[in-house]
Amino acid sequence: MKRRDEVIVGVFVTAALLVGITGTLWLARRGFSKSYPLYARFDWGQNLKEGQQVLLAGVQVGFVDRVDLNPNGYIDVKMAVDKGRRIPEGSTVTVAAEGFFGDKTISITPCRKAEPSFPNEVIKGPPMQTRPDVPPPFSPPCRPGAFYAAGDTLPTGLPAPSVEAVLGRLDTIGVALGQIMQAVKVELVDQKGIQDLHHTIQSTNQLVLQLNQVAQEQSKGLTQTMTALRRSLNAIDSAAVDSTVQNMKATTEHLSNLTANLQQTTQKLDGLLGKLDNGDGTVAKLVNDPGVYNNLRSLLARLDSLTGAIKDNPKKYLNVKVF
Amino acid sequence: MAQWAAFLFAEIGKRVLFVRDTLRAFREPSTWLPLTIPEMRDIGVDSMPLAGTVAAFIGAVTGYQTVYQLFPGVQLSVVGWIVRQTLILEIVPLLTALALAGRVGARMTAEIGTMRVTEQIDALETLAFDPIAYLVLPRVIAGCLMVPLVTILSAAVGIVAGGLMVVAATKVTLHDYTTGLRLTFIPFQVYYAVIKAVLFGTAISLICSYEGYTTEAGAEGVGRSTARAVVISSVIILLLDALTAVYLAPQLAG
């Protein structure tokens, strides 16, 4: 029994110690991951504590390992960065707020890329400066392939705006809002602008009512037109339309035949004209032969002389006897 | 008033002398050493089911409640952070100590008190045994050593139970939970819990042993001593909890 107690107690104590030590290390060292030290220096009053996150471009790469108060107005911070995470040389550190509870993280801002990582990558330049009174964020270009080594001290970037600065900005906004509200009050209340506005709204309402009436009338007219159109369409006799279409089809066919006949006639005329041109046949000879023409003219001359002779002496040629 | 003050100081004096006698009993290891292991089993191993169950439920409920107290926009890793801080720094050491005051302390007082009223302690003295080395010191050592270990294991059980609960029943992911567990963690938080547990364990064993050792008036006196031991040890545990918070919590700020 005594031996059994010893074994059980021994197992229990060992298990408890193992759980306590490994659990503490797991929580403190983020899962037993190996790390290397980097250092940073900040002004006093940053509310940094051991165990806070260290983020590189928003991704946790380590934690705050130690915070030492430097009597010269600084705090020296030792960061434990995961072995597999390399910090590009030129990156800067700032203390950033995390969440709603005022917790802080150390934010490492990567340097600007100097060369693209892949084809067609657009490299962003320094952020556009919108306010001349605020210095641009310090973001030096990267040196390709250069990373901070264990024990290096990272340069400090521009800190996030302090609560006082934010409150000051809020105060300014509040003053501006107050001035705007005062101007609005003067315009709307003191100078009776609100009454004008009221009238305008009433006029607008009336206009909207009138427009509604017009739209209703137009709608009625449109409805009537549509009804008449429907009625006309219904009145069309589809049989008559069919017969018309048939007649048109027949006419078209007749026109086709006529065209064919005209073509044939044209061909025949072409042939006839060809013969006329060639001088084949009687007509062609009549047309083309100058001898015939001359004979015809002499014939006509003779006929004229004959006609003249007849006129002059008809009895010579016309001897009509009755009985 | 003077009588009341005399009574108060006498009670304090008796207890201080009892502690002195207990420390003196270290000179007799042959008496207390063999009895320490069974007491360690009783106080530590046998208490683990009770302490573990309490811690598991507290961890699960704390995690679940925390999720539904967060207002929109709060990062969910806060759940792991709150569970860790609540369990390790306060709830587990305190509730484990209170549970052990009821389970172990009451038994301790009853055992020693029964030996007192049945004159077994007088018999030990007659046999030249130091009754404090025989009855009290093994319990004090066991309480001082085992309560912290029970606390550590219970905290682990509570944290795991809290994680299982929130991951299974809420939108918190395991990654959120573990991120929160590690957020601003410093080993001193564990040392803080262990320091409290050592104080609580020592207080339970000393108070309950003293009440049993000074039991009078037969079986009725045993009952009265047992009840008084549980009440006093519970109050002292709460007082020590407040004192440790006052003196040690500032160091948790890092």
Image (cartoon, coloured by chain):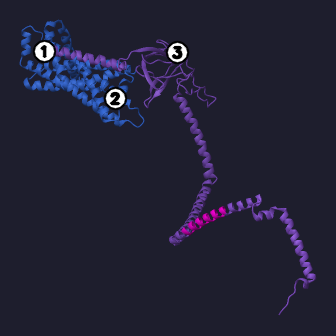
Q: Residue furthest right?
A: A312
Where residue A12 appears, x then y in whole percent?
20, 17
The quadrant the C terminus of chain A occupies is bottom right
Give, as a single range, the part of the protein colored magenta: A246-264
| Residue at the (15%, 13%) spot, across then down | A6
Residue position marked by numbered label 1 in the rendering: A4
Q: Identity of the amino acid at label 3?
A: Ala
**Is residue B22 shown above or below A194?**
above
**Is residue A150 shown above or below B110?**
above
The reply, left or right, for residue A313 in relation to residue B116 is right
Front residue (pair B134, B235): B134
Image colour for chain B is: blue
**Is residue A20 shown above or below B180?**
above
Residue A322: quarter of image: bottom right
Chain bearing tag 3 is A
Q: How many marks?
A: 3
Q: Identity of the amino acid at label 1?
A: Arg
Residue position marked by numbered label 2 in the rendering: B174
Q: How far is mark 2 from mark 3, CA to CA?
A: 35 Å
Residue position marked by numbered label 3 in the rendering: A146
Q: Is residue A75 visible?
A: no
The quadrant the N terminus of chain A occupies is top left
Q: Identity of the amino acid at label 2?
A: Leu
**Is residue B108 shown above or below A260?**
above
| Residue at the (11%, 13%) spot, across then down | A2
A263 in the magenta segment = yes
Discs 2 and 3 carry the same chain letter: no
Front residue (pair A270, A245): A270
